[in-house]
Image (cartoon, helix red, strand yellow):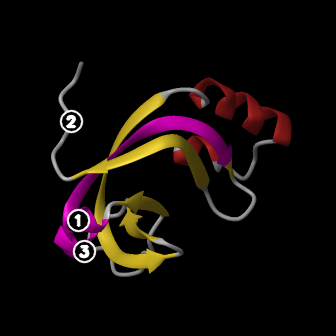
Amino acid sequence: MREKIQDLELTDLQQNRLIKPYLGKTVLWQGWVEDVKEKGNGFVCCVDMDKPDIIFSVYDFEIEVSEDLALKLRKDQVVYVTGTIKSIDTTLGFNVKLTNPKLTTQKPRKQ
């Protein structure tokens, strides 16, 4: 998905046409814990979609987690994120926003 949408030869129209079918889709992604932080009155897990052995990689997004889960998570731990794609923005890199994102340490079963 990412490589197709970020093709530098695409016009804005072509890029928007490629993005549209993904909007509203429910996703299950595997990522790795980059860090866990306090943010505001809660906690966030910084999730990197690249494997921990990729040297030059930064986390892709933050997801709110409970204090209990925040204290249990470890760096480079595999986590699973589910949610519905709300938007995809390629202005500065590649940014996907999810509606109702949830993070778990156990891979959810297919329904």
Query: Which residue is under mark 2?
Result: 108
Q: Amino acid at mark 1?
A: Asp
Q: Residues within 10 Å of mark 1 (few under 14, many from 20)?
A: few
Q: Amino acid at mark 3?
A: Asp
Query: Which residue is under mark 3?
Result: 53
Q: Which residues are magenta?
A: 67-88
Secondary structure under tag 1 reads helix
80 in relation to 44, above or below: above
Looking at the picture, tell me which residue is in the foreground, 59 or 67: 67
25 in relation to 58, above or below: above
Name the outermost residue toward the front: 41
Q: Amino acid at mark 2?
A: Pro
Looking at the picture, tell me which residue is in the foreground, 90 or 10: 90
Q: Residues within 10 Å of mark 3 (few under 14, many from 20)?
A: few
Q: In the rendered view of the protein, which quadrant contains the C terminus?
A: top left
Task: Answer with mark 3 or mark 1, whichever residue precedes in sequence.
Answer: 3
Residue visible at 84% across and 34% down in the picture: 13
Task: Answer with mark 2 or mark 1, whichever residue precedes in sequence.
Answer: 1
Instruction: Left or right? Give the position of 89 relative to 105.
Output: right
Mark 2 to mark 3 CA distance (whole Å): 25 Å
Query: Which residue is under mark 1?
Result: 68
